[in-house]
Every structure is written in C-alpha cells, then in structure tokens.
Amino acid sequence: MKTWFADIEINEDGSVAECSPCTQDVQQLAKRLLVFQADPKQIPLASFDPVKKAIECGFVSGKTEYYSLLQQTCIAATRLKIKNSYSPDLRIIHAVEALDDIDEAANLLAERLGIWYGEHFPEAGMLTENLAKFVAENGLRQDLPQDSQFRETALSSVGMEMDAEDGAIIKAFAADLSSLYERRHVIESYIRKNMEQLAPNLEKVAGANLGARLISMAGGLQSLSRMPSSTIQVMGANQALFKHLRGKATSPKHGIIFNHPLIKNSHPKIRGKMARALASSLSIASRVDAFSGRLNPVIKEKLDRKVLSIKEGDK
Amino acid sequence: MKVKIFHENIFTLQQGKKRFLATRNLTPGLEVYGERLVQVDEAEYRIWEPKRSKLAAMLLKKLPSPFTTTSKVLYLGSATGTTVSHVSDIVQQGVVYAVEFSPRTMRDMLPVCEERANIIPLLADASKPQSYANVVEPVDVIFQDVAQPNQASIALSNVQHFLKPGGYLLMSIKARSVDSTAKPDTVFKQQLKTLLEQDNSKLELVKKQKLAPFHIDHLGVVVKKTE
Ligand SMILES: C[S@@+](CC[C@H](N)C(=O)[O-])C[C@H]1O[C@@H](n2cnc3c(N)ncnc32)[C@H](O)[C@@H]1O
C-alpha cells in the first residue's frame, strides 16, 4: 500500500513485510502526495496506523518528528496545488470586473465634469468621453485654437468666466477622466483577444463583451458550461427571477443576454423565442469551449438558421 | 472576567450578565480571524462566537463535546479556519486534519496552519476520502460542516474509512444546501436516515439539536460509532 512517506508491504498479521521509506525531502514528499491524491491507488486499509508504521519503518524516530514532517509536507503540497489551481479565465473575469469599476468611476467623474465645465461653457454641448477629450486638449473657452469650430460659440458664451488657475485644474481633471476612457478601450481589446483564445465559440455567438460577462457571472467558463441553458437565459435577471420564484411575476425571459443585438433589436413579441434560441446556442458554445477550446463555426450557423425561422414564423 | 470549565479545554467567560464561549489560545498574542482575545490571570482566551461557528452553536445548544487534549480530529469543510482554530486550541496535543476543497478558501487558511503545529491542511474533496487515505490516520472525532446536498453520504464514507470504533461524528446539516424547496424537518429526517440506516454502519445517534437562533434551518448531530 501507499502512504505519504513510503510504499509498504504488510503481512497478514499486520506487521511490516517490506518498507523503503522516502527521504525526508519535503518538496519531493509533497509531489508524491499530489500524485496519489490525483489518482489514489493501493489505498491503505481503514485501520492502518501510519504513525506507528512510519516509526517502525525508520522514516522518523518519533511522533513529534512525524507530525512536524507531515505538516510541512501537507503545507507544501497545498501550496503547489493552490498555485496550479488558477484557471486562465480568471484574467477575463478580473478584466470584466475592472470594466465595471471603470464605468462606475467614469460615470461619476463625467457627470461632475459636465456640470463643472458646463458652468463655464454651456454651449459646448458635449458629453462623457467627447467632453473629457475636448477639455483635456483645449482647456477653457479662451484657450481654444484659432481654427476650432467652437471659436464663435465660445466668444458669445453666457458661461461663467474662469482664469488660468481654474483652467489648469479642470483640464487636469478632464485628462484623468479621458485616460480612464482610454484604459477602458485597452481593457476591452484585451478581453476580446483573450476571449478569442479561451472561448472562441462563446466569443463568436455572444460577442467578446457579453461572453466575458457571462463567464464572470458564472464564476468561470467551467461553471458556465455546466449551467442549463434556461439558467443562462435568465442570468443577471436576479431581481425578476426572485420575484418569479416568490410567485409574484411571470418567469423572466432574458437576463444579461438582453444586451445581445438579436434580442435587443427584435420585436418584443419574439424576444422570448430569441432568448431561448440564443441561450441554448450560448450553452453549447460554452461547453465546446470548456471542452476543446476550438472554434466550431457550425454553432453560430445553426443559431443563424434558427433565428431566420423564428423571424419567418413571425410573419 | 470569571472563567468556568464548560467541557475539557472549552471554557465560558462570565462578564456581568454576559457569558461567552471561549478556548485557551494555543498561540498567545495571535488572533486568527478578528476574534476577541481576553487575558484572565495567566491565560489568554479566544472568544468563540456561536453565530460564526456551527460547532460553537452545537456546544451551546448542549450537544456533548467529544474532544480531549489529545484527540485526533478529521475536520471536513474547514473553510478559512475559523472553527478549526478553536478545535486546534482544544486538542492542544492532538491533530486536526483539515479538509477543504476550494483553493481560494484554503489560501486563507494556510497562514493559520503555519502558526499552529497541530493543523494538517488537505486541499481535497471530502467526498473522495480515498484521495487522502495515504495521510490521515484513524481518528477519534470527525467534524463535518460542508453544506452540500450529499452531506450525509460524505460523512458516512469518511466515518467508514477513518473513524475509530468508539469515536464520534459531529455534523451540521444545512437543510437548504440539501434541498432548498423541501421542509427542513423532512430534509433532516432523510439525511439522518442515510446516515444511520445503513447495514453495518455501526452508527448510533447520541443527540440531535437544531442550531437556531444561531443558525437557522441547521441541525446539529452527534453520532457514535459502536465498538
Ligand atoms: C459552511 S463552510 C465551513 C465553515 C467552517 N466549518 C467554520 O465554521 O469555520 C463549508 C465549507 O465546506 C467546503 N466544502 C464543501 N464541499 C466540500 C467537499 N466536498 N470537500 C471539501 N470541502 C468542501 C466549502 O468550500 C466551504 O468552505
């Protein structure tokens, strides 16, 4: 039988027939432990007492030494196993969550900039990213370049006067916001690249962003692939779903997948059907991705045919 | 505060009308998860909140403690080590084999193991006891808090492999993890049946007790393996 410290042959009467203990190298022992754990073979009997046998075999001289080595070995094995447990989709999950954080922060800052700069130049009529870029590049009304299309409007603005010091502050604030938007684009293309590699089928059916979001909400590609398509269909519709479970509403037809153009751009009458078709296709895509990770164009083609037939049926 | 012995190595501290469950700190000066440390005379105690630990709730709800200073314990579902650390206090000269299958959770428990010589971490699935059978020795107590649909059968397979005759299984059954729609009492009955009505499982019920108000819809169970 195999123990963590030796392979042991036991006689019928329970005494040790043969035992060649491993050396007391913690890293080696830890690796041995993990090999056994992944594929347990020659399992010790239920009544087997490893502590006694380890001393009998001469692996250790006493109990204290035994437990100290065992603890070191198990800690080392646990560390190794933790280190190897991170799945590559974690990077997608963190990136998607970072996007959400950026959106939240950017919305808040953009609103502030809109109000602040609007006080000075209400006629500029820009919002969010455009406004941030504009202010970061130009600063105040009086600093606009000669050829700026806003020059005329700026001259006749009813906005509050601001001086160079005000301008420096607001310009820097806008620059920060603008770089936040830039960061968002960079992360988005990072997600796209990673999705193409890790979940090409999901990427194809859902699009990179929605696909990544589904992975993130499910807690990983593996768990997404184990979800029934009916769950994928309502994922993110938590409030509506709980209402339904409490018996206070009809079952929700779409959660986060509502953001998919197939559903968003469909007539409300056929959205339910579309959501079901899309969810089923997403479910298949995630399974193929979790299993093989190779693109199979048939999945998307099938969905396209189904979509056509839903639209036909609606006519 | 006034210290009273509650069970072997388990104490209550009385402060006015308030009474706290506590264990004596094996690593004085160090707290594990933000629990309160209290110095009384020469000893330092760690306050053990029943709301944060199913085992503490079980003890306060008068389920018997099978732990002694030298107990060997197999702990299934150790999470980040909150309760494990108190068990480690109790079985000062014993061992706790702490099984947890979530790497992320185990990552937070490792520092606790590094501070306490009697905790052996096992990042493994408690429903596959074979996978750690090359490490774990026969034990006096199995404690289980895994919150899984098949918790009774997980307990059973570990009992069969690791529990000494005369040893005890303590488990917390969470009704909603087994079946979120069934009535808790129905779930408890069915889980106890799985546990006790096996051929030659040699298990007999010592006591069961609901863990409310500390934990809603949880049943604490103490079972003994006959000789
Ligand atoms: C309710 S928590 C335990 C809390 C802990 N006993 C305490 O009081 O500090 C349940 C834990 O069991 C773990 N778990 C669930 N199923 C498991 C299994 N089959 N094997 C090992 N651990 C499991 C979960 O990851 C989770 O950390």
Image: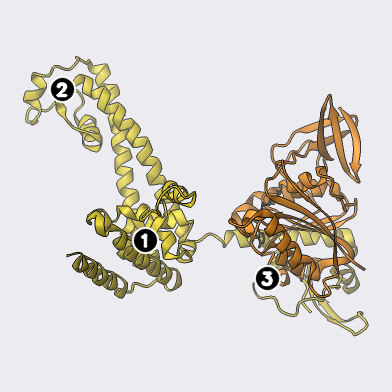
Chain colours: A yellow, B orange
Mark 3–mark 2 Cα distance, whole angstroms, equals 70 Å
Q: Position of residue B130 (x, y in %)?
A: 72, 72
Which amino acid, mark 3?
Gln
Secondary structure, mark 3, is helix
Q: Are marks 1 and 2 on the same chain?
A: yes
Pick whichever, B85 or A52, lies toward us. Answer: B85
Relative to A141, residue B157 above or below: below
The chain that hosts pointer 3 is A
> Which residue is label 3 attached to?
A37
Earlier along the polypeptide chain: callout 1 or callout 2? Answer: 2
Q: Which residue is mark 1?
A: A195
Asked if the residue under mark 2 is in contact with the one under mark 1, i.e. CB atoms within 8 Å, the reply is: no
**Residue type indicated by callout 2:** Arg
Q: Residue at the location (82% across, 73% down)?
A: A46
Q: Secondary structure at mark 2?
A: helix
Q: Are marks 3 and 2 on the same chain?
A: yes
How would you rate the neighbour count of disc 1 (Cα within 10 Å): few for under 14, some for 14-19, many for 20 or more?
A: many
Q: Chain of mark 1?
A: A
The total number of labels drawn is 3
Q: Foreground mark, 1 or 2?
A: 1
In this view, the residue farthest toward the front is A247
Location of the N terminus of chain B (image quadrant)? top right
Quarter of image, ligand 1: bottom right
Residue A141 disc label: 2
